[in-house]
Image (tube, grey):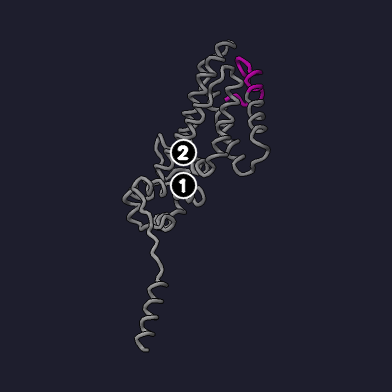
Amino acid sequence: MMEGVATDSSTSTSSDKPRRTRRTRMTGAERREQLLDIGRTLFAAKGFEGTSVEEIAAKAGVSKPVVYEHFGGKEGLYAVVVDREMRQLLDMVTGALTAGHPRELLEQAAFALLDYIDAYTDGFRILVRDSPVAQSTGTFASLISDIATQVEDILGTEFKNRGFDAKLAPLYAQALVGMVALTGQWWLDVRKPKKSEVAAHLVNLAWHGLDGMEQKPRLIGHRKN
């Protein structure tokens, strides 16, 4: 009788034993992308200084050495995130400039930046912060300068057609792109009015400002220097 009880107990234990679920191991490339996604989210929410390697590793479910293995540290991860976001924004702006008419080109440039803010909000938040690993090619200011260079070519042609000094095109390009970029930073948080209205108002100010430009603008105040 005791043997029967022992046998039943043994059978019951065997049938109730939980099965182990096998975890799928990430490839090196998959782990790298996971760390980039987590880093982007944390850097956008907390900034570079407020984010730690420990937190990045914990979110990814790995140890700190894994982060160091892929990026050499927090600075390396941040640099890759910034570089990707810069290329994404520059590609979107470059790809958008397809129209022939200058006013429509302004619309396309404004929409490209606002589209980027809409689709890559975390990326834009990171770009507009001061970079702790700032390089001549790694800051938001340099990115805006790259975009302004493209706008400069458009304005240069328009200036020549209107009889203006084409040498001033770089100045006006920086002013126009800077205006759109700063408005984008403001719209990032308020999200009002809707994107199409923001683009229309930006182009309204830029286009009609250019339309009414004086060939030799004068200061009307007392200060001259």
Indicate the position of residue 17 as horizontal and vertical percent values.
40, 71
Is residue 205 toward the left or the right of residue 88 in the image?
right
Indicate the position of residue 18 as horizontal and vertical percent values.
41, 68
Residue 173's place in the image compared with 59, above or below, is above
Q: Say if mark 2 contacts mark 1, CB within 8 Å.
A: yes
Other-residue count near label 2 (Cα within 10 Å), few / some / many at <14 / 14–19 / ≥20: some
Count of residue discs = 2
**Residue 114: quarter of image:** top right
Q: Which residues are magenta?
A: 207-225
On residue 40, the disc is 1
User: Type of residue at label 1?
Assistant: Arg
> According to the image, label 2 marks what residue?
85
**Residue 217: quarter of image:** top right
Indicate the position of residue 137 as horizontal and vertical percent values.
40, 34
Answer whether residue 208 is magenta in the image.
Answer: yes
Is residue 50 toward the left or the right of residue 176 in the image?
left
Residue located 68% across and 38% down the image: 193
Residue located 35% across and 53% down the image: 25
The secondary structure making up most of the magenta span is loop
